[in-house]
Image (cartoon, grey):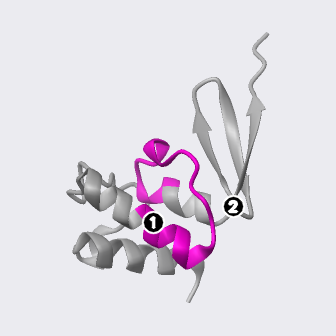
Amino acid sequence: MGIRERVRRLVAAKLNVDIEDVVPEASFVDDLGADSIDMVEMIMSVEEEFGVEIVCPEKIYTVSDLTNYVCGGRVIFSGGENYFFSGRSIRVPVIRT
């Protein structure tokens, strides 16, 4: 089972939702009904399961945000981009001309 599928299953289990509802564009709060406690518990489970540290959990809104983070992708923040590699965050400022 791949990382993305493992993330989907973990999210479905922690939020007690059908796995069919855990699609990349699903918002944890608006679509999956998570509250702040659900989010904290889910983030902690993801950190433990995948050996990563989520440094800005408040910036993770969708299933896609979370899977990209775990897979070593990137999450775009205003004013720059944060790249995540092996659980480390590297801030790269955006230079506008």
Name the quadrant of the C terminus. top right
Q: Residue under circle 1? A: 44
- Amino acid type at circle 2 is Gly
Helix, strand or loop at disc 2? loop
Helix, strand or loop at disc 1? helix
Report whether 69 appears left or right of 8: right
Task: Compare residues 30 and 56 and report the one nearer the observer.
Answer: 56
Q: Is residue 51 magenta?
A: yes
Binning the other alpha carbons within 10 Å of mark 1 as few (below 14), some (14 to 19) or many (20 upward) gives some
Residue 23, above or below 13: above
Q: Give the magenta-colored segment's residue range.
A: 43-65
Badge number at residue 87 = 2
Binning the other alpha carbons within 10 Å of mark 2 as few (below 14), some (14 to 19) or many (20 upward) gives some
Give the tally of numbered discs.
2
- Amino acid type at circle 1 is Met
Report whether 71 appears left or right of 25: right
Residue 56 screen position, x and y as percent: 53, 45
Task: Compare residues 63 and 48 and report the one nearer the observer.
Answer: 48
Name the quadrant of the N terminus. bottom right
Q: Residue at x 60, y 60 (%)?
A: 53
Report whether 30 appears left or right of 53: left
Q: Main secondary structure of the magenta part?
A: helix
Q: Residue at x 35, y 65 (%)?
A: 41
Q: Residue at x 60, y 38 (%)?
A: 76
Residue 85, above or below 45: above
Q: Is residue 59 magenta?
A: yes
Give the CA distance from mark 2 to mark 1. Answer: 13 Å
Q: Which quadrant of the structure image shows residue 92?
A: top right
Q: Residue at x 26, y 69 (%)?
A: 15
